């Protein structure tokens, strides 16, 4: 009996002690110079790939390091705001987070960068040693600055976007696959719609998803999704997209599916029957990855009916970050380290956030993108980048953009009336963002 | 002699009973009762995040409930619609679930049939329940999507036409949700009902058979009446689970309840308020309404099935 009591006493004592010790351990190691773990949050692996190939060092244990800090990634997909939710939770918990969990740097997209830049969860990067923005595009710095002009991060890419067309279909339908000539036949929405009819007549699709042209329209909005008074605004540009998609549906010019849907994938392969895709450099380098294998070279790039930009990946420094040197080094490397930035262009066909390097490639007659049949895409993007203005954005953009496309598609598919589609969209926004006034 | 009677009249073991159930009550109070009270409490507050800015908590009385029960522009009260969706999908799955489970339970427990390989069969029918609901739903999504293998098959045989989209048609999405729930839960129900039937005295079946009762007669006059307590229990737990339906429809419709929100369940609606803005006020109010509706329905079911007891 005594023995049993003794044993249980010892057990209880060990439990209590171990709890106390672990508790102390966390508190003790919280603040001392550079942290051991460089924690980065992102929504996909695009930047991770570049980071591991060109910047971080791989040690013998198979892990990547920046300085002495081990790199840890947390990747949560964007869709439905899942990434923002995870990020919000992490950022609001920075003070209590353990070394493992504390976010040092995170990636943000154009749709929601404003939310983080305007908050206290990001910090002034000029104070940690990121000061030279002379080569970057101005809009990328503006997008990462708060109202007072404090810069909270940098973008490693610049995202002017264009129209990617399939050369073989262009030859068949338009009689040419020369980018300048194709552009002259597609430089307005009227001409674009006319070519759609020509495509249909020859058995092709104009676009592979009803949302394909969405970003071109939405990026030319005259008002933000949510105005200064907190009202939801359906801009005339969005209305124009809705009208166009309806007309495309009626005439069978497109496939009724999401811009990321699987139905669209076969259209990017060698069996595809679609003339136009819309997007910036990351779109055909990263998202059309499978097309690289089956129909490389059968693609061309031109400006398209309207100039626009889409997305972009900003690296932001999180408040409470304890790896400021690693964060600053990463940011500097991806905008100002000539060697790395040049490789991003020459090996990864990126359009980088460094005007000097981009212009060097733009004027290099030997440079061409294999995917685009040797066309110098950088030369075109250098011109298009001049038009980019970061404006009419709000922190609610991601779910507004996703929601309108989804609920409108229910109308396109004939499941609801126009009014119902818009009412469902308003309901969705009201549920997600109680502060937004969604009344008509 | 009387003086020799022991001072303690009887040894009370009751206190051990109480001591042994203390852990349950502790866990119940901390992890169930306290959060429940907190949910009620939260439902009276405006409490959400706008971006990274916390709004509230601010006491607003019944405003959250009012917002939920106010008809929308088109005149429908949304939460009632979502209750309707949930109950319809639950019934679509529960009816076959109970019919098949009852049949199987009767077959497996029938001593005259003496079915071989019961162990394997029980494992197999229980198997779908072991797979994560989201993985199971994802599998079905892939099978029935526009690029999945089922659609071309049905198009070629002329059953559906090319423009048919399983995930944009109310009846097919609801049907898939019901099928998945049925597949996942009929094994569980079978095993519970079997346990119930096995608890019935075998001699009753034997004497009924000796008296020449048919199998149907035995089922309705012996099995069902004696199985009732267990049957009511499984039915009510299935209903409570059904009202809280979330994972399957959410994965199949990408959390949107497409088409026209006809597959949106109450918990998916609640989840819309939680994701994005952490709206504890509205989510709390929905939970409370769900709690009340569940309680009322359970009482109704209990009273109806158990009516002729006394």
Image: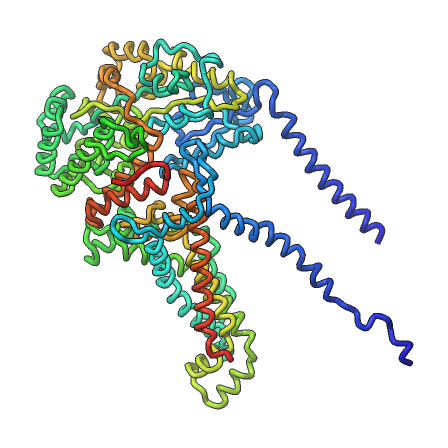
Tag count in the figure? 0
Which of these two is toward me, A178 or B98?
B98
* Residue B138 seen by the camera: no
Which of these two is toward me, A181 or A110?
A110
Name the image quarter holding residue A428. Answer: top left
Name the image quarter holding residue B176. Answer: bottom left
Question: Considering only vertical position in the picture, is B64 above or below B3?
Answer: above
User: x and y percent of residue A289 in the render?
Assistant: 31, 30
Horizontal relation, residue A179 to residue A9: left or right: left
Question: Considering only vertical position in the picture, is B222 above or below A154?
Answer: below
Horizontal relation, residue A421 to residue B206: left or right: left
Query: Residue at the location (63% across, 56% down)?
Result: B24
Query: Residue at the location (76% across, 41% down)?
Result: A13
Which of these two is toward me, B219 or A155?
A155
Which residue is situated farthest in the bottom direction here? B211
Question: Considering only vertical position in the picture, is A427 above or below B159?
Answer: above
* Residue A224 seen by the camera: yes
Which of these two is toward me, A182 or A59?
A182
User: x and y percent of residue B23 in the render?
Assistant: 66, 55
Horizontal relation, residue A413 to residue B51: left or right: left
User: x and y percent of residue A191 in the render?
Assistant: 10, 28
The quadrant in which the C terminus of chain A is found is: top left
Colour scheme employed for the rendering of this structure: rainbow
Query: Residue at the location (29% across, 21% down)?
Result: A390
User: x and y percent of residue B248 in the render?
Assistant: 39, 52
The quadrant in which the N terminus of chain A is found is: bottom right
């Amino acid at each position: 009996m005594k023995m049993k009591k003794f044993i249980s006493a010892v057990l209880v004592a060990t439990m209590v002690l171990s709890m106390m010790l672990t508790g102390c351990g966390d508190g003790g190691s919280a603040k001392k110079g550079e942290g051991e773990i460089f924690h980065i949050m992102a929504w996909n692996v695009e930047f991770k790939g570049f980071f591991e190939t060109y910047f971080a060092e791989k040690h013998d244990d198979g892990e990547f390091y920046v300085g002495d800090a081990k790199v840890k990634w947390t990747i949560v997909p964007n869709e439905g705001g899942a990434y923002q939710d995870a990020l919000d939770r992490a950022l609001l918990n920075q003070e209590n987070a353990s070394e493992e969990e504390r976010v040092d740097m995170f990636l943000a997209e154009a749709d929601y960068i404003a939310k983080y830049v305007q908050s206290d969860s990001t910090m002034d990067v000029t104070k940690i040693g990121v000061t030279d923005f002379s080569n970057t595009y101005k809009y990328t710095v503006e997008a990462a600055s708060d109202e007072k002009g404090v810069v909270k991060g940098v973008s490693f890419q610049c995202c002017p976007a264009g129209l990617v067309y399939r050369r073989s279909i262009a030859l068949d339908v338009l009689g040419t696959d020369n980018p300048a000539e194709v552009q002259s036949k597609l430089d307005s929405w009227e001409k674009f719609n006319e070519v759609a009819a020509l495509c249909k007549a020859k058995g092709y699709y104009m676009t592979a998803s009803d949302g394909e042209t969405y970003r071109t329209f939405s990026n030319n909005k005259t008002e933000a999704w949510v105005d200064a008074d907190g009202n939801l605004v359906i801009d005339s540009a969005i209305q124009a997209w809705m009208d166009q998609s309806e007309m495309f549906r009626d005439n069978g010019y497109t496939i009724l599916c999401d811009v990321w849907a699987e139905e669209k994938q076969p259209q990017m392969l060698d069996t595809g029957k679609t003339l136009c895709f819309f997007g910036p450099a990351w779109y055909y380098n990263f998202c059309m990855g499978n097309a690289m294998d089956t129909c490389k070279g059968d693609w061309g790039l031109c400006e398209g009916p309207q100039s626009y930009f889409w997305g972009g990946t900003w690296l932001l420094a999180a408040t409470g970050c304890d790896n400021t040197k690693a964060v600053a080094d990463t940011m500097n490397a991806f905008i100002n380290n000539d060697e790395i930035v040049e490789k991003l262009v020459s090996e990864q066909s990126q359009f980088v956030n460094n005007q000097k390097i981009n212009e060097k490639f733009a004027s290099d007659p030997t440079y061409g993108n294999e995917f685009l049949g040797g066309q110098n895409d950088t030369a075109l993007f250098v011109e298009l980048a001049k038009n980019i203005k970061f404006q009419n954005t709000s922190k609610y953009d991601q779910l507004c953009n996703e929601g309108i496309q989804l609920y409108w598609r229910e109308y396109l598919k004939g499941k609801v009336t126009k009014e119902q589609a818009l009412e469902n969209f308003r309901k969705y926004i009201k549920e997600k963002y109680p502060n937004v006034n969604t009344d008509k | 002699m009387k003086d020799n009677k022991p001072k303690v009249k009887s040894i009370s073991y009751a206190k051990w009973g109480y001591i042994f159930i203390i852990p349950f009550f502790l866990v119940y109070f901390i992890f169930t009762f306290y959060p429940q009270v907190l949910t009620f409490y939260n439902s009276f507050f405006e409490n959400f995040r706008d971006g990274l800015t916390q709004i509230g908590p601010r006491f607003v009385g019944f405003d959250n409930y009012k917002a939920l029960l106010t008809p929308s522009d088109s005149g429908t009260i949304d939460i009632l619609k979502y209750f309707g969706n949930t109950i319809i999908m639950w019934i679509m799955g529960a009816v076959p679930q109970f019919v098949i489970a009852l049949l199987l339970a009767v077959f497996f427990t029938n001593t005259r049939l003496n079915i071989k390989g019961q162990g394997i069969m029980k494992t197999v029918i229980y198997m779908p329940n072991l797979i994560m609901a989201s993985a199971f739903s994802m599998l079905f999504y892939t099978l029935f999507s526009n690029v999945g293998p089922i659609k071309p098959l049905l198009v070629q045989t002329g059953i559906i036409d090319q423009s048919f989209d399983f995930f944009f048609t109310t009846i097919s999405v609801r049907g898939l949700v019901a099928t998945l729930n049925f597949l996942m839960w009929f094994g569980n129900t079978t095993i519970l009902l079997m346990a119930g039937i096995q608890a019935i005295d075998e001699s009753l079946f034997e004497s009924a058979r000796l008296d020449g009762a048919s199998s149907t007669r035995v089922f309705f006059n012996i099995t069902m009446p004696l199985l009732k307590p267990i049957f009511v229990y499984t039915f009510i737990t299935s209903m409570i689970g059904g009202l809280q339906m979330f994972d399957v429809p959410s994965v199949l419709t990408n959390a949107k309840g497409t088409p026209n929100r006809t597959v949106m369940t109450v918990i998916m609606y609640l989840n819309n308020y939680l994701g994005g803005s952490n709206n504890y006020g509205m989510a709390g109010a929905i939970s409370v309404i769900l709690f009340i509706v569940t309680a009322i329905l359970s009482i109704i079911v209990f009273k109806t099935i158990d009516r002729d007891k006394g």
